[in-house]
């Protein structure tokens, strides 16, 4: 078996040739490192690219016109897998996963199969009371909500996510707090995710979390459990924006020069399998964006008999620099 999986298609090979940074596999080799799997503990499921927003930083180019939505049949196959193989955590993502009509049934069934079920939300998909039933369901099943909230600055946030998004997000966070989410001792975990609104890397996660705690509670009475600060991945809509704005080369070089070998150990791809909306397997959600399949071959979840073994290689490309820049992406 090769030490590193190679890009699977011609488009990705061509994209790598145009990138003004050293190939990621060479950087690993220089540090005497390899990116391989440990025990798989997390199942990540992308239930579709349909989203009520079209964020500038989206690596999957999700949006209101997307037709890629996980079917009920594929969801049943996901539940069957979780029933056969125990996972310590199951992570539901999108698009806006709330817009998949089969999500409530999926939540109820998966909550019984894992000690930690997470739902990633852009918050606005839960606004205006349209999906209060979904919030109630999450509360009943103690689903961890991981919410996108990029910035405390309204103008910056809306430049990335769209007009009116900031205040809608504040409203949903306050509603979640009123139901116990983020409150000490409630057992209802509310985590925030902050992404930079431009072509730069995030500040210190510890400092950002402290500032978000202070400002959100002081201005709006909002509390939460944890904040995660991640860099934007130069794929999809964010890459297109970088190209149009003339920032692509500078941003990629910034990621590469910020490579932190210590970040390799905790990368999420090492302990996770990621299922795309149409049921195919990847090492992470970012590899979905470039059809870089797990194990170097296109495998459907219905064909998966056992989890990948520790030590198996992870498919890599230039975008992996995002997850190893600074404090990393775990």
Image (tube, rainbow, N blue to C red):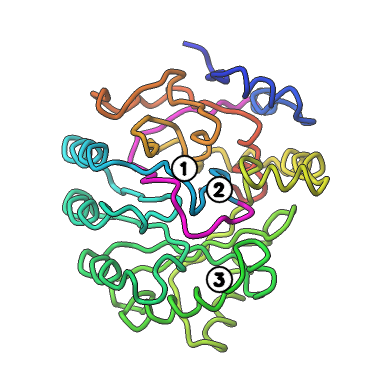
Coordinates of residue 299 in the picture (x, y in percent): 35, 22
User: Which of 274 and 95 lies nearest the eye of the viewer?
Assistant: 95
Instruction: Describe the element under mark 1 as helix, strand or loop.
Output: helix
Q: Compare residues 258 and 137 and report the one nearer the observer.
A: 137
Q: Position of residue 314 (x, y in %)?
A: 49, 27
Q: Which residue does the numbered mark 2 point to in the structure image?
A: 329
Q: Please, is residue 159 above or below residue 260 in the view?
A: below
Do tag 3 and tag 1 residues touch (Cβ < 8 Å)?
no
Q: Nearer the viewer, mark 3 or mark 1?
A: 3
Residue at (74% x, 54% y) in the render: 200
- Give the camera-side residue of 298 and 143: 298
Question: 118 left or right of 8?
Answer: left
Alpha carbon distance from label 2 to label 3: 25 Å
- Circle 1 sits on which residue? 268
Q: Residue at horizontal 63%, vertical 51%? A: 231
- Whether tag 1 and tag 2 are in contact, CB under 8 A, the answer is yes
Q: How far is the residue under mark 3 from the one under mark 1?
A: 29 Å
Residue 56 rendering spot, x and y as whole percentages: 64, 54
Is 299 positioned to the left or the right of 64 in the image? left
Work out how far the residue at label 1 is from the one at label 2, CA to CA, in angstroms.
Answer: 7 Å
Secondary structure beneath dot 3 equals helix
Q: Residues within 10 Å of mark 2 (few under 14, many from 20)?
A: many
Residue drawn at x 25%, y 39% as measured from the top left: 78
Which residue position is annotated with label 3?
165
| Residue located 21% across and 42% down the image | 79
**Mark nearer the N terminus (2 vs 3):** 3
Label 1 Cα crowd, 10 Å radius (few <14 / some 14-19 / many 20+): some
Verify whether residue 288 appears in magenta: no
Specify start and end residues of the magenta stretch as a single range.
Answer: 32-57
Q: What secondary structure is the stretch in magenta mostly built from? A: loop
> Does residue 235 appear left or right of residue 181 in this picture?
right
């Amino acid at each position: 078996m090769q030490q590193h999986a190679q890009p699977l298609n011609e488009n990705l090979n061509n994209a790598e040739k145009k990138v003004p940074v050293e190939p990621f596999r060479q950087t690993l080799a220089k540090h005497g490192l390899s990116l391989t799997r440990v025990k798989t503990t997390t199942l990540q499921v992308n239930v579709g690219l349909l989203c009520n927003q079209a964020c500038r930083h989206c690596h999957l180019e999700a949006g209101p016109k997307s037709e890629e939505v996980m079917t009920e049949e594929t969801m049943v196959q996901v539940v069957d897998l979780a029933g056969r193989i125990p996972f310590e955590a199951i992570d539901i993502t999108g698009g806006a996963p709330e817009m998949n009509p089969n999500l409530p049934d999926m939540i109820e069934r998966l909550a019984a199969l894992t000690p930690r079920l997470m739902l990633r939300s852009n918050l606005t998909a839960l606004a205006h009371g349209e999906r209060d039933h979904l919030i109630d369901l999450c509360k009943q099943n103690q689903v961890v909500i991981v919410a996108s909230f990029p910035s405390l600055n309204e103008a910056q946030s809306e430049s990335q996510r769209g007009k009116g998004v900031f205040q809608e997000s504040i409203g949903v966070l306050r509603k979640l707090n009123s139901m116990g989410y983020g409150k000490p001792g409630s057992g209802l975990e509310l985590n925030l995710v902050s992404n930079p609104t431009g072509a730069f890397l995030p500040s210190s996660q510890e400092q950002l979390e402290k500032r978000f705690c202070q400002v959100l509670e002081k201005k709006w009475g909002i509390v939460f459990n944890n904040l995660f600060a991640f860099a934007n991945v130069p794929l999809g809509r964010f890459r297109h924006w970088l190209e149009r704005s003339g920032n692509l080369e500078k941003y990629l070089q910034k990621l590469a020069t910020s490579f932190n070998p210590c970040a390799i150990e905790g990368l999420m791809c090492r302990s996770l399998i990621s299922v795309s909306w149409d049921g195919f397997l990847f090492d992470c959600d970012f590899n979905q964006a470039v059809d870089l399949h797990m194990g170097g071959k296109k495998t459907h979840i219905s064909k998966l008999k056992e989890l990948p073994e520790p030590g198996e290689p992870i498919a890599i490309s230039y975008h992996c620099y995002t997850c190893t820049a600074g404090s990393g992406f775990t």
